[in-house]
Amino acid sequence: MNKDIFLTNNLSNKKEKFVPIDKNKIGMYVCGPTVYDDPHIGNARPLVVFDILFKVLKCKYGDKSINYIRNITDVDDKIIKSSQENNISISDLTKKIIKNFNDDCNFLNCENPSSEPKATEHIDLMINMISDLINKNFAYVNNEHVYFEVSKFKDYGKLSNKKLEDLIAGSRVEVSENKRNPEDFVLWKPSNGNEPFWSSPWSKGRPGWHLECSAMAKKFLGNEFDIHGGGIDLLFPHHENEIAQSICANSTKVFANYWVHNAFITMSNEKMAKSQGNILKISDFKKKVSGQVLRFALMSAHYKQPLDWNEKLLNDCKNTLDKWYEVYSSLKTPSKIPDDMLLPLYDDLNTPGYIANLHDLFDKASKGDENNRNIFVSACNFIGLLSETKNQWQDFKKKKSLISEEEILTKIDLRNKARKTKDYDEADKIRKELLDKDVLIEDKNGKTVWKFK
Ligand SMILES: [Zn+2]
């Protein structure tokens, strides 16, 4: 399409026209998972958001013009802690979580990025980058650690709009007696005991987390590239630190030209995060809903807006897909999607605007015209919807319609009444009935909770 793509760039905090460095070789780097635990719905949002951006860029510039890199952080303090707590080796843990992560990406119908480099396979590049930073006097060694000296980079804080004084005053920085200044951040640290380590000129140790993205972006996309993405929680300090490291090590003016961040997923308007204890893992949904429903829910709000996650959202998405599948027919060749239809996606990935266009197109398609029907299915397929055949969709529904949520709650109520009157045979019978329908129940702090097996 002959229209421009616009993106909100956090460097300027404005919506800007996207102008690639080289339209035949567009680079996009998105921070990927730290593989210490199974991905949750909050992690799923950037997967879907940047998958859609990948598709939009390919649509405009051609399939072969986009190099989409998403790293895997497989060395990190959280991984070490989780391996110790769960008594599993680091390599077994990271292998298991990477597999689950890939399964979840498939479940959400996300395309594979062009490359998914692992941090542990690029330690040599990170050591080189640290050496460069030390030689150029942006980093210093102290007591087997290497730190980046933040005050040496005058643009620090530009992306997140933070001033150095505020950072120090707000104690957003980790204090350590090895640092010259509290705001400096670690590039290399020694490993002790049975922590994983690599040899380096400074100590047997491992890199700081921020460094891997700078090193791998350089390898796969060069010193300067087009788009850097991730969740808004990465804006500071992670992305700020990536910029400082890369610009200083590579002696460039910019690192990435466009910084794109998706907002949080909330539950009852609170951020979903492991530390908040309110996470829902993607795998928890696999027996309850089709991945299509999850994908649809994740694109139902604009990527810059928080998305509140609740049962009603999932039900609405499921009902819409049910309706849309009524006109589904598999396509031999996809139809061309009209420019007007695509415009919202070109305009800062406005997925709700695109979904509104899909509703209009559905109304036309449901009147029986085959051409409209083909355009509708093609337009859904474009953003990864209606990717299952009608049979797959209905099979899933059949499987899930063994019991409704309402029936489950009624049964739980009956079981609790039976327990109150000490009719334990009846209570056990109900528990077994639910189990036969793949519903597991558990009594926790005076409440009964349930989930699909
Ligand atoms: Zn990163």
Image (spheres, helix red, strand yellow):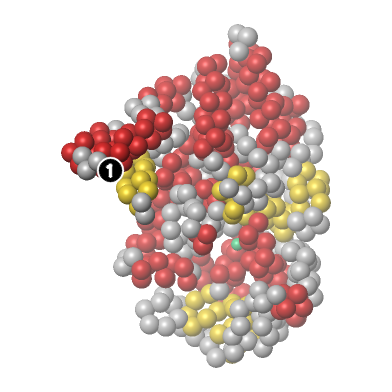
Question: Which quadrant holds the C terminus?
Answer: top left
In the image as oriented, which residue stretches furthest toward the top?
Answer: 368
**Depth order, front residue of 357/62:** 357
Vertical placement of residue 242 versus 95, above or below? below
Quarter of the picture holding the N terminus: top right
Amino acid type, callout 1: Lys
Quarter of the rendering containing residue 24: top right
Which quarter holds ligand 1?
A: bottom right
Q: Residue at x 75, y 63 (%)?
A: 159
Where's residue 352, x and y in %?
68, 34
Is 213 in front, or is 235? 235
The reply to whether residue 277 is visible in this rendering is yes
257 relative position to 400: left or right? right
Q: Quadrant of residue 366?
A: top right
Q: List the residue tagged with mark 1.
A: 420
| Residue 345: percent from left, percent from top | 71, 36
Count residues near mark 1 (Cα–Cα under 10 Å), then give few for <14, some for 14-19, many for 20+: few
Residue drawn at (41%, 70%) of the image: 81
Q: Quadrant of residue 426?
A: top left
| Label 1 secondary element | helix
Q: Nearer the viewer, residue 17 or 114?
A: 17
Q: Position of residue 335 (x, y in %)?
A: 63, 21
Q: What is the x, y in percent for residue 210? A: 60, 69
Res 400 seen here = no
Q: Residue at x 35, y 46 (%)?
A: 448
